[in-house]
Image (cartoon, helix red, strand yellow):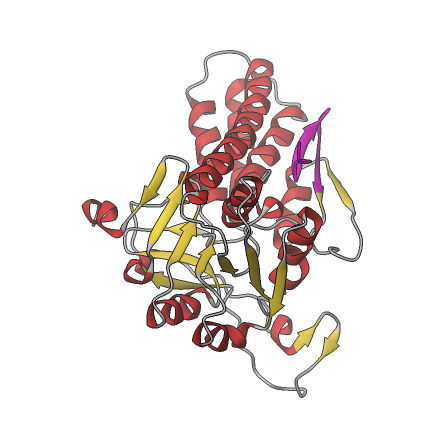
Amino acid sequence: MQTRTIEWRDGTVLTIDQSKLPWETVTLEMKSCGDVAEAIKTMKIRGAPLLGAAAAFALALTASHSKRKSKEELIYELEKAAEILKSTRPTGVNLFWAADRILAKARNFSGSAEDLAAFVVEEAKKIADEDVAANRMIGKFGAELIIDGDVVLTHCNAGALATVEYGTALGVIRAAWEQGKKISVIATETRPKLQGARLTTYELKRDGIPVTLITDNMVGYVMYKRMASKVIVGADRIVQDAVINKIGTFTIAVLAKEHDIPFYVAAPKSTFDLAHKSSDVIIEERKPEEVTHIGSLRIAAEGVNALNPAFDITPLDYVTAIICESGILYKKDFDKFK
């Protein structure tokens, strides 16, 4: 059994500080919504499904430690906490989905403030458990697309560290590996935060799955040389007409289509935002220092401007299929939402 990336323990939320990996393993102990929000903003917690669970647990912390005497006062406190969480990172939808789910159930709850607080904690645990189950099903369905000898290229980190447990894109790879399929992985470094180099290779090496690290600008070469047979990535939001994922995903999708390589997206339904189109999505812009520096080391001349969108938009025309917990979906399955 894998260790969960995030868990509730006696009024405290425990998670791995992903900014420290792979050099050291540090456990964060978060006791308030503010602690969780700060961890999200600083990317100590990252990965769309994990952000959903983290938001749920942040509201559980709010409810658990609240001194409010009425249900209405507690709901107001939960609403204010949700606003703080929603202000942290605007693009990944799972965070919003989890917060809105708990708020909706809290508003419809009949009982005392004390009972509501206990209910919110249990609902947060339920969201985490559901994410684990969804990831396992994604792995099961996605493994059907993997055959012996496949070399799977993946971008960023959509593994256990990006979820409560197991992973989405890496969950598919794990499931295929557990079935005995002889596969290997090519992982992009994923500039500027290097989630592929730091986190994906760390996870795969830990699990004994062969992995080769490449720089982001090697993808064209790798595909031209037929060194990758499939691409599997995660997603931060899936809308009617596109997949929003880590910056660089669209480039890989275009190259995959040009070289006739299947391009798969693995994500739970909590990532689906089918009421919206790509033009509605706010793409998070992060600090230019992430581009002008590697860690604390400046690599660009003083005064140089840098563009740093955290995500890009991949139209569904470039996506072979989307793997979710209910099966494998194709572009035509999304046409009814347009």
- Would residue 13 be visible to someone looking at this image? yes
The answer to whether residue 8 is magenta is yes
- Which span is picked out in magenta? 1-15
From this view, report whether residue 333 is shown above or below residue 63: below
> Which percent across, then down, holds residue 3?
69, 36
> Which percent across, then down, holds residue 247?
48, 66
Residue under the point 41% across and 57% down:
244
> Which percent across, then down, holds residue 276?
30, 50
Residue under the point 62% across and 47% down:
161
The answer to whether residue 28 is magenta is no
Q: Nearer the viewer, residue 7 or 215?
A: 215
- Would residue 193 be visible to someone looking at this image? no
- The part of the image, by quadrant, that contains residue 163 is top right
Q: Quadrant of the N terminus?
A: top right
From this view, report whether residue 3 is shown above or below residue 44: above
> Which percent across, then down, holds residue 291?
61, 74
Tally the marks. 0
What is the residue that sits farthest to the top in this orientation?
Answer: 111
Residue under the point 51% across and 44% down:
176
From this view, report whether residue 203 is shown above or below residue 116: below
From this view, report whether residue 227 is shown above or below residue 116: below
Q: Nearer the viewer, residue 50 or 188?
A: 188
